[in-house]
Image (spheres, helix red, strand yellow):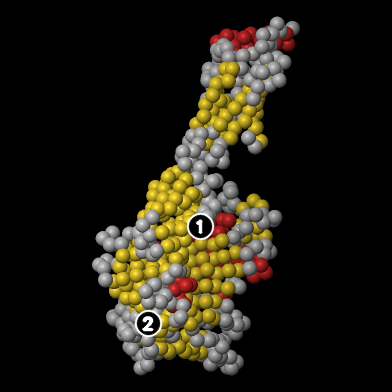
Amino acid sequence: MTSPSMSGLLTHVLVLMLTLNAWTGLAHEGLPLDENVAMAEGRQASMDVDCTGYSFEDLFEYDFALFGLTVLDDWATGEMFATAWVNESNAAIVRDNLDGLFEGISDNGYISTDERDAIRSIGPSCIADMDTRLTMDEGVPHDGEGGVNRFQFVQEGIGLDEVNLVPLDHEGVRTCQTFGSTSNCKEVPTSATDNLEITLDVAEGETNNVRWDQLPNAGASNFTLGMNITNMSNAALVVTFPALSGLRLVDFRVVDNAPATGDTCDHIADPSFTYLADGRLTITQLVNFDRTLWDLECHMFMDFTTEAPVNNDAPAWTEAAPENGSVIATAGAGTTRMAAGATAFTWGEDADGWQLMCEFDQPDWTVTANVLGDLFVNQPTTSSVANGTCRLVDPLGAVDDNNTRTWMFGTLFSATADVAEDGIGGVAHLTGTGLVDQATVRLQAVQDQRTGELSDAATLNGGETVNITFSNAGFQPGVFTINLVAEAIGMLPLMATLDLGLVKPNSLPVLVVQPNFYGENATWSENLQRFTLTGTVSDADLEPVSLRLSLCGADYTDFTVEGINWAIDVSTAICVANTLEVTHVTLTATDDSGGVTELTAIVDAPISDEPSGVPEPAPASDEDSLPFLSIHLVLACLGAALVLRRADEE
């Protein structure tokens, strides 16, 4: 058998073999095609490949690989993922191995984007044929002889990708030289040592990518998980089971084929395990296998049960846990984080982990946790204060009902806020509810990745209102929120995000035309066919601003901008072509939020006794549409052409 996730990864190799064969119309003896290959511009139209019996380790050398399996609630399907990291010299070996597969076809010392694209397109079909290496059987523990319930890949659920297999920023990148390559194909030397990654995941829109015969008792009865770990070098396997009361690992063993060399699998250490905050059991197995020991085969087996152990002590509180009578504040109805996972973890101790279970004296209050262990209090709209009696319960159900903690949960304040008239900064108004006598509060405005300055500390007294100034300097026009931190004696620190409907209004750009030395807006060329305008543009919100100039029905955007200063050189050819008088231009500044500032500037040409000469050609507008040339200009140009032709004939 081959590794479940690694076998998915090896598809890159196999698919490339098949694809390049398709490009040249050659059949590969080792990998039969189930259907004919249709040729079109150097690519196959469709291909069904058979990748049974191939191993990732046959051709790839990776530095580390992470494989994961999440068993879904139906105990019949799962999500399998994998990431293999290949670094520096190993990356060059991988690329060279790929290229070496195509002897006589395209083994030119380069790896191409065409080959990469082939992996992405038909890789899932190849993976679906492979052995996942995994079995899961309900009943008496076994060492392989009873492992008949094998996992299978689900083709439509397989997502396959790679990162940097063909590093296009490599100094040796070039256009593909192989006959039949696509027009935009690029290739790099196989000697490239740029790091690369290969990944397997659940395809977009799908819910699983592996399946097996459903366990009759859905994990509630004893079962064994088996896996072939032969040649899996420097890898980690993480398996997560659905939340199931009492589920635990009771035994682990690795068996080998006892080869004549005397090599064994005794170096494989026991797995580690943990219970996630939502009750799911996660097993982590590390594997370090000498890939040169080709005669050695290793199989590992994990036995699970839901039977209660003979001895199981209940979890105990630690000194870090909040004392009885502690206050746990909220920002009002809804969900408030009461403690980060790293903090909550220190509140109790148990060999198998624990969960916090709370009972409230008011309806609809609950305490929950996420997969990171963060604890949350969920407050209904029907009450603002409740007392909760909390216990620590381990995954096997052990609990000490005589060792509880009672805490007061409740709303600390009500809040409103106003944004300043100019949109810069504002004031939040917080009114204490009396949950605590006094608290220290700090605020900070937040918008996406932008944050305002942290406010000075303010004192919030019960029943009183405090006004706290906040800054939103550097924010873009639009919605923003307020982060709050509150601390008080006997109260857990409260960190909350307040959505108070705050919006920073858009400030329109400021657009100015700078007169020249003579006090005129436009500086004209000697032949009066062009003029230059200069000025400044700024935006209080620091948003990018685009500029446009309109003259005689045409738009110009080729401004030179340095900081707040701008300049533009404008031809009057379009005006002459349409017999329009040049008197003014319209300038428009538009910021990223759509705010528009428009002004009109007088640009009368100075009076000149000299003829203006033949006008310059009219430029194309941004929309590639030009006003029609006047009949006068067309006749003038035609006449000039006839005169020149007659002169040539004479």
Question: Residue shown at 28%/80% (left/top)?
Answer: 216
In the image, taking residue 146 as reference, residue 27 lies left or right, namely: right
Question: Residue shown at 50%/45% (left/top)?
Answer: 425
Q: How far separated are the C-alphas under marks 1 and 2?
A: 40 Å
Give the amino acid at mark 2.
Asp
In percent of width and height, residue 31 lies at: 50, 69
Crowdedness near tag 1: few (<14), some (14–19) or many (≥20) residues, C-alpha within 10 Å: some
In the image, taking residue 138 as reference, residue 532 lies left or right, namely: right
Callout 1 touching callout 2 (CB < 8 Å): no
User: Mark 2: which secondary structure?
Assistant: loop
Of callouts 1 and 2, which one flags the residue occurring earlier in the amino acid sequence? 2
What residue does disc 2 label?
394
Give the amino acid at mark 1.
Ala
What residue does disc 1 label?
457
In percent of width and height, residue 170 lies at: 67, 56
Is 434 above or below relative to 77?
Answer: above
Which residue occupies the foreground of this view, 40 or 459?
459
